[in-house]
Image (tube, rainbow, N blue to C red):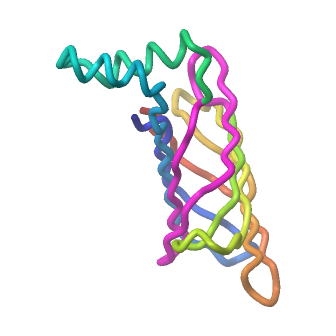
Amino acid sequence: MTIHRASGFALNGTNFHVLRIHIVEALNPQPLYLKSLLETKSNSTERRIRENNKTQGSNHRYRGYLRLGGEDYNLAGMIIMYENGKTRNYTADIVSQSGSVRVGTISVILRTHEGARIGEGSLTMNHTRDPCVYRVLLAVDEG
């Protein structure tokens, strides 16, 4: 289930890059519950798994992807905070596509501005000789 999709810009002085972020919730059902769902051949398996996760106190797991300029990265170690059922803010490590190298971090605060959902924050890329810090401005489409 998509919980956050956003596009915008990463700004650093007079330089800027197009930025896209996509975060999805990875369902984490308990094995015995999943087996019972498969046996009932439920048409609404995903919804029932999500409901069971809430009642069982199951930890949420997320997968995320980030595109900065022409480069693709994965997001790891995500911490997502909610308020009134909507994403309020999140932080994540930015890792290479292979997942073996941490190349930066991102932190975004979400709010409503003039009727639109926006994100503001910072993005730091450490994989070059000179680390670069960007200001992040996003238009948000929450799933």
Residue 21 drawn above or below residue 59: below
Question: How far across and how far down the image is residue 53, in percent?
Answer: 51, 19
Outermost residue on the top side: it is 55
SS majority, magenta: strand
Q: Looking at the image, which residue sits at the far bottom? A: 129
Which region of the structure is painted magenta? 60-88
Q: Nearer the viewer, residue 23 or 41?
A: 41
Image quadrant holding the N terminus, namely top left
Residue at the (57%, 18%) spot, across then down: 85
Q: Quadrant of residue 83?
A: top right
Residue at the image position 70 percent from the left and 58 percent from the top: 93
Q: Residue at x 43, y 27 (%)?
A: 31
Q: Does the segment drawn in magenta span residue 64? A: yes
Above or below, comparing residue 29 to residue 103 in the picture: above
Q: Is residue 106 above or below residue 28?
A: below
Q: Viewer-proximal residue, 139 or 113? A: 139
Query: Where's residue 126, x and y in %?
Result: 77, 76
**Residue 111 image position (x, y, % from top left):** 65, 31
Q: Residue 19 at x, y = what percent?
A: 54, 63
Relative to the observer, which residue lies in front, 42 or 78?
42
Is 136 on the left-hand or right-hand side of 58?
Answer: right
How many marks the image carries: the answer is 0
Q: Is residue 47 left or right of residue 43?
A: right
The quadrant of the picture occupied by the C terminus is top left
The image quarter in which residue 84 lies? top right
The residue drawn where x is 63% and y is 55% is 76
